[in-house]
Amino acid sequence: MPEFSGCSEMILKWFWNDFEMILKWFWNDFEMILNGFRTDLKPIWTDFEKLFRRRNAGMQMTDTDRNMLMWDETIFREPEIFELDYLPPYFPHRDEQLDAIRYALKPALRNVRPLNCLLYGPPGTGKTSAAKKVIEDFLPYADHVIMVKVNCQIDSTRFAVVSRIYRAIMGVAPPGSGVSFNRIFEKFIGKLIETDRTLIVVLDDINYLFYEGNANEVMYSLLRAHEQYPGSRIGVMTIVNDPAVIYGFDQRVSSVYLPEEIEFRPYSLREIDDILSDRIRNGFYPGVVSDDVRSCIVRHVAETGDLRSGMDLLKRSGMNAEKRSSRTISEEDVEKAYAASRTVYHDRLLETLSAHEKLILEIVEKEGEITAGDLFDRFSEKADIGYTRYYEILNKMIAAGTVTADFSGKGVKGRTRLIRPGIFGNSASGKTRPSDRKITDFRCGIRRKTDSPADMFRRILPGTGRPADKKESCF
Ligand SMILES: Nc1ncnc2c1ncn2[C@@H]1O[C@H](COP(=O)(O)OP(=O)(O)O)[C@@H](O)[C@H]1O
Ligand SMILES: [Mg+2]
């Protein structure tokens, strides 16, 4: 301890003693704090160390290495978002249509027979999804209302349609073979009346019921049920690509079927961009799809306006990127996916065609473009069926979009039809790319300037219209 004198010595002594104490005190606490720090901050420090090491290693990585997707990683945040049956919470640009459907069906909530409605528009414009959305809205009122959605592409006979309805109402499958359509119909109507409920039947892609002559019978039974079975309440929502389908109903049906017509026009480029951006945001991790790649996808989708193909394109592009172990989707991934989706679409289409339809498609794809008359000549070299049957088959293919028909202005009465490959063109040779055609070409059946909707319908679906019209040839 140093020697001091007087007052200053006293102060310094006091300070020195206290300072020593403070120092000791601080030293003990400091040691304790430091130990606490060591234990508490250790995990943080370890992480920091790891990050630091990774950063150092990263500095030695090339850009390609850094973009590598590890085998146990994925760029898909929610893969189910790209599945076809996914119903998105964000469903923009269809408010008007959703309101119109709700308005038509709302009376059912008060146990009054709802208005019938017809949803029409090109493929992939959200018709089925809009119907599903409204069904979802109505579910809380399921006590009063039974909603049955029938996919007519799958259930294409009248028996299949009533079986589907029967299952929804009765909760069990209908009795097996030997039971008539009328018997099954009577049974579920009886149950409907007994439980005082209203039935809404959604007939999706109803055009498929026409091909085997089931449409009129099904519609007639549903629409006129209240006449035969008083107390029954049934509303029918039909969904179709082309509104001309209603001209295919016979007098018995058309006199009672005056539906609310709800149009689903093709989406604009901006709307497609908005819808796909939402899927990209929710379906992929951030940074996977750049703005340029998104624009490339949107452009492809806008060629057909078919959003279903858009979802497929997103999914396939993502899978292509993962195949390359990339964290980002490139334009090449999109182009490859686009080419593949055309081929897959084509192969899937072939599986659904009959032998005669395959033969017709084969000739049309080989030629790229052929008049309906020449097509018949080529077809009849290989197939032993008459002109009338050929005409029916061709019309069905036009209605389904497998091939397209346009009027050339040449030939007898200037009405020669030019037949070309359908929606995805000739996937093998790429002769007819979708981009070569306009969206209106993808509608089933092309309306001539002078056509009334009824005329067009008679052309696109066989066996309909007045007998005099049926004799008239379009070739
Ligand atoms: N407005 C929309 N918002 C979000 N997704 C949509 C919209 N319209 C269509 N889609 C999506 O596009 C795809 C095709 O729609 P879908 O209802 O099957 O069309 P359609 O029945 O007219 O052929 C579905 O995956 C659907 O979720
Ligand atoms: Mg649909």
Image: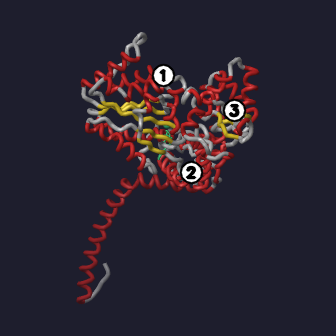
Q: Which mark is residue 475?
A: 3
Give the amino acid at mark 3.
Phe
Secondary element type, mark 1: loop
Distance from Cα at disc 2 to Cα at disc 1: 44 Å
Question: Image point 45% across, 22% down: which residue?
Answer: 158
Quarter assignment of residue 180: top left
Q: Is residue 325 visible?
A: no
Work out whether mark 3 precedes mark 2 in sequence or the reverse, and give the earlier one: 2
Query: What colouring does the structure picture have?
Result: secondary structure
Quarter assignment of residue 317: top right
Secondary element type, mark 2: loop
Q: Contact (CB < 8 A) between labels 3 and 2?
A: no
Label 2 Cα crowd, 10 Å radius (few <14 / some 14-19 / many 20+): many
Q: Can you say which quadrant of the picture contains the C terminus?
A: top right
The percent coordinates of residue 342 (x first, y second) are 64, 37
Q: Is residue 354 left or right of residue 45?
A: right
Q: Which residue is mark 1?
A: 157
Q: Is residue 308 left or right of residue 418?
A: left
Q: Can you say which quadrant of the picture contains the N terminus?
A: bottom left
Question: Image point 49% across, 35% down: which residue?
Answer: 246
Q: Which residue is mark 2?
A: 289
Work out whether mark 2 precedes mark 1 in sequence or the reverse, and give the earlier one: 1
Q: Is residue 248 visible?
A: yes
